[in-house]
């Protein structure tokens, strides 16, 4: 048994003497009284357990072995303290204690549930989840503000970051790749807020998206051809709209012989290719030094001989470096950004470039955008909870000071089914794709026109 303290000789029965039988246990309560009883039993067991184990030694054990030994101790303590616990109760309490010792406490059951995509903690007494695109309030709670803050600090520490009063905002990730944002008091008035975007364990492809009605089959074919033709693609959408999922699905179409450099604030991309270099930003230390920004990493990536650069999310002056990368031979690069329409995405890129330099005239910035970006894929989470591609838009050129575009596909809403699911079609527009000549270079022009015409 790990780290257990030696039993006190005075408590051991003498040789040959019979140990006194424990008094009869009280009757098992039921219903709400049973829930309260389990909570009080958990508190008593936890106090007794921490007196008997070495926490440092326990943290080094594999989870399964730690759980087995904790279960043994729970059985012993339950007998000593006359707790009326079934084997199922002991199993639940053991799991809860292990989650608290080496996991993320009350959040662990939610992390294990594969139907949950997002976890949102609003202080110690309120935890929401997203399941099938809908928000639900759970009965999960933390003991107090200190318990919640301890879990937040554990998340940050594991990836070499920190969260406290002097540094109350933190972007991090869990061991499975789930993305985490933490904002602590005094900025979070009602207690520490934790937002977790769970890592999808199942790899989602464009074919999977067709089955889930995120896209249509012809649209999927056009996206596959766009990736094969090494188009520079921007994926635009709101928070939680599925931008990273789409980026992961498109990245699976990249040839395994290419060198890919990924750049993210918190690493969450799931690239399957063998030749991938993953880069992640770093916040400043306590002295305000040592920060490595997205812009630093994009600049450095250009010196690493990449075939493609994939930027998790462009949100600032690194947009200028990303455009320059796309314009200097790194075809097939991809990135995501926050915008509600393809036209707004172009304006947002323009604004972010102006954060990097105010000396470039507007026309020059727009020409650079047109020269760098071939395709904008707009994604949205709709009111039925399903994420859909609403626009696939090409950047065609310039007319005076204006960037000209053309839609290849748009989603057209037609109604609502009895189950609340939206009904609509992914309409292919009767236009000649601007990248048709490029598709011909790769021998995919006929396949592209067939997908556009539905033939």
Image (cartoon, rainbow, N blue to C red):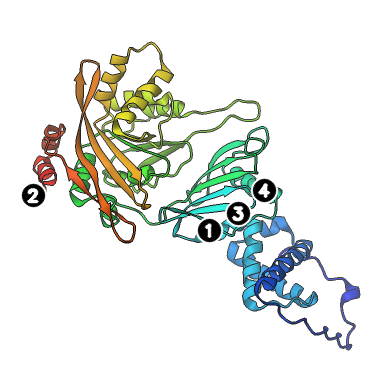
Judge left or right: residue 230 versus residue 78. Answer: left
Question: Depth-wise, is mark 1 or mark 4 nearer the camera?
Answer: 1
Mark 1 Cα-neighbour bin, 10 Å: few <14, some 14–19, many ≥20: some
Tell me the number on the disc at residue 96: none
User: Residue 107 falls in which quadrant of the image?
Assistant: bottom right
Q: Tell me, yes or no, if residue 409 can be seen here.
A: yes
> Mark 2 and mark 4: span between their CA atoms?
59 Å
Name the residue beneath numbered marker 1: 110
Q: Quadrant of the N terminus?
A: bottom right
> Closer to the camera, 338 or 151?
338
Judge left or right: residue 3 versus residue 446. Answer: right
Question: Depth-wise, is mark 3 or mark 2 nearer the camera?
Answer: 2
**Of callouts 2 and 1, which one flags the residue occurring earlier in the amino acid sequence?**
1
Mark 3 Cα-neighbour bin, 10 Å: few <14, some 14–19, many ≥20: many
User: Residue 2 falls in which quadrant of the image?
Assistant: bottom right
Name the residue beneath numbered marker 2: 455
Question: Depth-wise, is mark 2 or mark 4 nearer the camera?
Answer: 2
């Amino acid at each position: 048994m790990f780290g257990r303290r030696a039993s006190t000789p005075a408590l051991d029965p003498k040789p040959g003497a019979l140990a006194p039988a424990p008094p009869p246990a009280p009757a098992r309560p039921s219903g709400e009284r049973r829930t309260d009883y389990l909570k009080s039993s958990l508190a008593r067991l936890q106090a007794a357990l921490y007196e008997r184990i070495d926490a440092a030694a326990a943290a080094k054990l594999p989870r399964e072995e730690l759980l087995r030994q904790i279960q043994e101790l729970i059985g012993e303590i339950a007998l000593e303290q006359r707790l009326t616990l079934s084997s199922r109760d002991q199993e639940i309490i053991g799991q809860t204690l292990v989650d608290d010792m080496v996991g993320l406490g009350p959040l662990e059951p939610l992390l294990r549930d594969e139907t949950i995509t997002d976890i949102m903690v609003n202080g110690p007494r309120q935890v929401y989840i997203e399941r099938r695109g809908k928000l639900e309030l759970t009965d999960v709670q933390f003991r107090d503000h200190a318990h919640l803050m301890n879990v937040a600090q554990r998340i940050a520490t594991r990836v070499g970051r920190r969260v406290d009063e002097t540094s109350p905002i933190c972007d991090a990730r869990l061991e499975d790749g789930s993305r985490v944002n933490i904002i602590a008091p005094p900025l979070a008035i009602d207690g520490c807020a934790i937002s977790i975007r769970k890592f999808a364990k199942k790899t989602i492809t464009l074919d999977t998206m067709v089955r889930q009605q995120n896209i249509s089959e012809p649209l999927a074919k056009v996206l596959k051809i766009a990736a094969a033709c090494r188009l520079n693609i921007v994926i635009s959408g709101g928070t939680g709209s599925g931008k990273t999922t789409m980026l992961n699905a498109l990245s699976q179409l990249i040839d395994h012989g290419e060198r890919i450099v990924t750049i993210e604030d918190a690493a969450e991309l799931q690239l399957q290719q063998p030749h991938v270099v993953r880069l992640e930003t770093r916040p400043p230390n306590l002295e305000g030094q040592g920060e490595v920004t997205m812009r630093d990493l994009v600049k450095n990536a250009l010196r690493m001989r990449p075939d493609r650069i994939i930027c998790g999310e462009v949100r600032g002056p690194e947009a200028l470096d990303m455009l320059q990368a796309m314009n200097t031979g790194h075809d097939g690069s991809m990135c995501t950004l926050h915008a509600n329409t393809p036209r707004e995405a172009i304006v947002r890129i323009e604004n972010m470039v102006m954060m990097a330099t105010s000396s470039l005239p507007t026309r020059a910035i727009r020409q650079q955008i047109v020269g760098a970006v071939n395709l904008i894929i707009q994604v949205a989470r709709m009111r039925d909870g399903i994420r859909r591609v609403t626009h696939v838009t090409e950047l065609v050129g310039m007319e005076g000071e204006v960037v000209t575009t053309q839609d290849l596909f748009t989603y057209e809403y037609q109604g609502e089914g009895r189950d609340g699911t939206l009904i609509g079609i992914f309409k292919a527009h009767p236009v000649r794709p601007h990248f048709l000549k490029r598709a011909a270079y790769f021998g995919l022009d006929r396949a592209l026109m067939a997908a556009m015409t539905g033939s």
